[in-house]
Amino acid sequence: MRLDADVLVLGGGPAGAWAALGAAEAGASVVLADKGYLGTSGAAAGGGNNLWYLPPDPGLRAAAIAGRQRLGGLLTDVDWMARVQEETFRQVNRLASWGYPFPRDASGQERRSSLQGPEYMRRMRRRVHRGGVRILDHHPALELLADEAGVVTGAAGLRRQEGFARWEVRAGAVVLATGGCAFLSRAFGLNVDTGDGHLMAAELGAELSGMEFSAVYGASPEFGNHTKGLMMQYATYYDERGRPLGTAGPAGRDLLARRLAAGERVFARLDRAPAALREAMRRSQPNYFLPMEKAGIDVFTQPYPLRLVLEGTVRGTGGLRLSGEDCATTVPGLYAAGDVATRELVTGAASGGGSLNGAWAISSGTWAGAGAARFAGTRGPLPPPGALRPAGRAGMRPGGPGVGRAEVDAFVAAVQERVLPLRHNYFRTAEGLTESLRLLDPLWEQARDRLGAAPGDGRTALRAREAAALAAHARWMYRSALARAESRGVHRREDRPAAGPGLAHRLLVSGLDRVAVRRDPVAPRLLTGAGVP
Amino acid sequence: MIEIVSAERCVACDKCVLACPTNVFDRGPGGVPVVARQEDCQTCYMCEAYCPVDALFVAPHTHPLPAGSPLREEPEVAGAGLLGSYRERIGWGRGRVPGARLAVGPDLDRAGPAPAAGRAPAGPARGARD
């Protein structure tokens, strides 16, 4: 299947949806291709988002920026933060004008600072469809297409519900909105987030930033995967014999991680929730409560066992470096929105959680869509499809005959063995990171030289390419983590427990066969002045 | 993971085949979906949300349940009122109040207990997603 468009958007989470809208509203013809289904794909759909939604009150907005730049380890950019506040406010108000059913407070006023995932994304799909965007569900992208000068001119992938036939879209610009990478950890809704976009971009020379801020785990029940943070504020932790260990919050998280890493079980019970609030809690957060009810657990009275599930660069910070306010990457014709882009500019070294990441998806999506449309408008006639260079290598064009599913699964497990365990990723040391890289480097070579499916095995072809992306991601993470010889935000170095003086700058990482880290020549720009802590 | 497709309730609309973000279902004989790739299920409940006749059940476990588990048996799950429970809770379906109207996360936050000593209002390591 071959299509042409001005702008091709890869990814159908919120960032992709807003990017498609932004491009279409700028007058571009748009195709959006998602690995799954626009409406259910990605981190937001299955859960919900609090939003960094602040009314245009300069004092309030400045205070929010000051608070976040401190939390973010002083790596943020005040201009980007202010732009995100402005754009999020504008777009969320549009969402309200389209009829999104926001909750109302006692006075009947809408509260526009949280979104329920399924409702949000169902409505975004409708809006994107009405905007004239051609939506391709179950069309995972495998690789970018470039012209002779290396300008991104489309992408190609497989139609996984039509016999894995190849699709190609030729476009004047491409927006990557493929999400972060959670390493197939089965975290809630995150198995579609395998870092595919990062790999595609890196194959054309893109730089990344903040990849050391990737050691983010969410607490879920031991048997399951729903990592709903909000309710844990009411939890008390217990050991196996029912002795209280502490409460949630940063100190509690540390305790949880240390105990679980040591192989000791930890239980939670929401006994600190005020009785009067419990019914409202149940109603407002089905994603937390319903799985527990299905499992027959009353969370207010029964302690249940916890585990920590890796959420990687979905809830972490790192991603493709942006080179302009229109969310251009360092590759011409390629734009990035949402979790595939670095969020350091607005969250620094701290997790953006739902609130900032949700606002970032809306804002960066809007800018990337408009930017891509503008770029496409500057190009002359595109080269004929046959003249475009498919840029995909590792995991899809092996030197040999390709491998079977079992070998690909074993490869994924080998990468996971170095990134999922708390002892390797949450509690980082120079020694541990070096050892991980010693094991991951040959895995990358294997992905480059051997990994790929035999002809006709489409399902393995998709997983093999994802597997290569996981290996690339792990190496960028750990090279950056080794270079940042300090602890800052979600990056924790057990051998360097304090923030280093003079290290409040961002780190860029690039390369596939040879991974290189350098200091970002652009310094963080902070809010300064009276009252800023 | 997805454990139950009720052939009795299913109307063969195949919405789940389309909506599942990890492509777990195939269209089976007569249009009734079959769970072709259970191991790809990411336990996100989206298929339950999109099923118009409450024919699907996703257990909250991230591994397949052993034979004999009550959460694999349609009569037990239906009897416990759990078939269609996700759709009901998010307020989808005729005559229901959209759950989005009740999703007052930040309000709960403010109404919550006073932070314990030493606990920052929002953790530096992460914020709540919802």
Image (spheres, coloured by chain):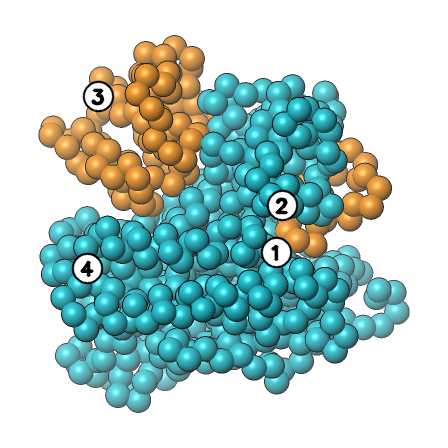
Foreground of the two, B67 or A343: B67
The residue where tag 4 is placed is A403
Distance from Cα at disc 3 to Cα at disc 1: 48 Å
Q: Which badge, 4 or 1, is on the more N-terminal residue?
A: 4
Chain B palette colour? orange
The quadrant of the rendering that contains the C terminus of chain A is: bottom right
**What x and y, as percent, mark residue B27?**
17, 36
| Marks 3, 1 in one chain | no
**What x and y, as percent, mark residue B4?**
30, 24
| Marks 3, 4 in one chain | no
Select label 3 or label 2 by which is in front. Answer: 2
Q: Amino acid at mark 3?
A: Ala
The residue where tag 2 is placed is A257
Distance from Cα at disc 3 to Cα at disc 2: 43 Å
Select label 3 or label 4 by which is in front. Answer: 4
Determine contact: label 1, label 2, CB under 8 Å. Answer: yes
Image check: A10 left or right of B85?
A: left
The quadrant of the rendering that contains the N terminus of chain A is: bottom left
- How packed mark 3 is, by other alpha carbons closer than 10 Å (few <14, some 14-19, many 20 or more), is few
Task: Identify the secondary structure beneath mark 4.
Answer: loop
Q: Amino acid at mark 2?
A: Ala
- How packed mark 2 is, by other alpha carbons closer than 10 Å (few <14, some 14-19, many 20 or more), is many
The quarter holding residue A307 reads top right
Residue found 18% across the figure and 28% down from its top: B32
Q: Which badge, 1 or 2, is on the more N-terminal residue?
A: 2
Foreground of the two, A379 or A300: A300
**What x and y, as percent, mark residue A275?**
72, 20
Q: Is residue A134 above or below residue B42?
A: below
Q: Tag on residue A427?
A: 1
Q: How many marks?
A: 4
